[in-house]
Image: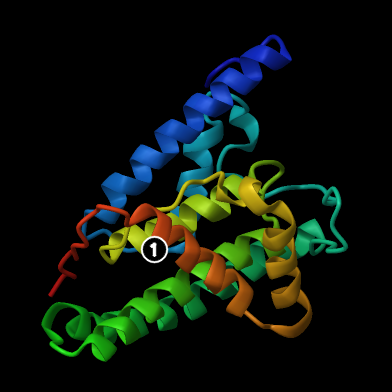
């Protein structure tokens, strides 16, 4: 196990390298036929913190948290394992819906069919992103993990991953979008932010799709 960094500067450096490592993990996993599970979210977190803060890497938190500049209070730490385990079944249902839409992406000739299929992918990415930020299952790095988990969904189904710092460009809109889901289960603002990010990333980039396992 890695030794904890000796100072803040080294910690930030290791975390930055960890994000790069986690981004590579996401890209590799997205191009594989390996299943996406809640355990995969933990693997993303482990990649971020394995060298920077090994004792929390991929491990659910054992303390309660407060989120800076947010009205949201994450669930009690004792609830986290059950909440994340329970989310696995819903994740699978949502991924199965994408799988059914995959045929439209690959074989559809009408633009409407393709857009419906892409919309399935974007909405699952938004759902998983919000799940991680709402439960806040880890001691640190929940936002980074949420964004990379959303990228995993996007990239696995052939879209381009977004910058994990996209929220810094409009932090208020990002926070309001998450709050809208917390209060009203309204995913539209977060979905719109993801679409905005996709539009930026697709400037000059060809879209491609990856086959699902048969």
Q: Residue at x 64, y 46 (%)?
A: 168
What residue sits right under mark 1 in the picture? 153
Q: Residue at x 67, y 60 (%)?
A: 174
Q: How many marks?
A: 1
Tell me residue 135's x, y (percent): 70, 63
Q: Residue at x 63, y 13 (%)?
A: 10
Vertical order, 16 against 83 (above or below): above
81 to the left or right of 118? right
Q: Visible in this render: residue 4? A: no
Q: Visible in this render: residue 186? A: yes
Vertical order, 53 against 191 (above or below): above
Question: Badge 1: few (under 14), some or many (20 or more) residues near its Cα, within 10 Å?
Answer: many
74 to the left or right of 110? right
What's the coloring here?
Answer: rainbow
Tell me residue 203's x, y (percent): 32, 54
59 to the left or right of 140? left
State the residue in front, 109 or 179.
109
- Looking at the rendered image, the quarter that the C terminus falls into is bottom left
Residue farthest to the front, as pictured:
204
Q: Give the secondary structure at mark 1.
A: helix
State the residue in front, 85 or 8.
8
* Quadrant of the image occupied by residue 118: bottom left
* Quadrant of the image occupied by residue 86: bottom right
* Quadrant of the image occupied by residue 189: bottom right
Tell me residue 43's x, y (percent): 46, 46
State the residue in front, 99 or 167.
167
Tell me residue 75's x, y (percent): 79, 64
Q: Residue at x 73, y 75 (%)?
A: 180
């Amino acid at each position: 196990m890695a030794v904890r960094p000796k100072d803040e500067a080294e910690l930030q450096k290791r975390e930055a390298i960890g994000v790069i490592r986690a981004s590579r993990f996401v890209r590799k996993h997205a191009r594989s036929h390996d299943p996406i599970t809640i355990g995969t979210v933990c693997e993303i977190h482990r990649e971020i913190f394995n060298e920077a803060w090994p004792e929390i890497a991929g491990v659910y938190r054992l303390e309660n948290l407060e989120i800076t500049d947010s009205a949201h209070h994450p669930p009690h730490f004792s609830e986290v394992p059950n909440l994340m385990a329970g989310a696995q079944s819903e994740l699978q249902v949502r991924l199965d819906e994408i799988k059914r839409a995959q045929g439209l992406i690959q074989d559809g000739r009408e633009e409407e069919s393709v857009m419906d299929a892409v919309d399935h992918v974007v909405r699952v990415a938004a759902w998983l992103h919000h799940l991680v930020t709402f439960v806040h299952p880890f001691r640190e790095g929940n936002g980074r993990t949420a964004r990379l988990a959303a990228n995993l969904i996007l990239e696995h189904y052939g879209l381009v991953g977004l910058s994990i710092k996209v929220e810094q460009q409009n932090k208020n809109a990002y926070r309001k979008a998450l709050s809208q889901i917390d209060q009203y289960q309204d995913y539209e603002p977060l979905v719109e932010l993801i679409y905005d990010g996709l539009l930026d990333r697709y400037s000059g980039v060809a879209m491609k799709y990856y086959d699902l396992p048969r």
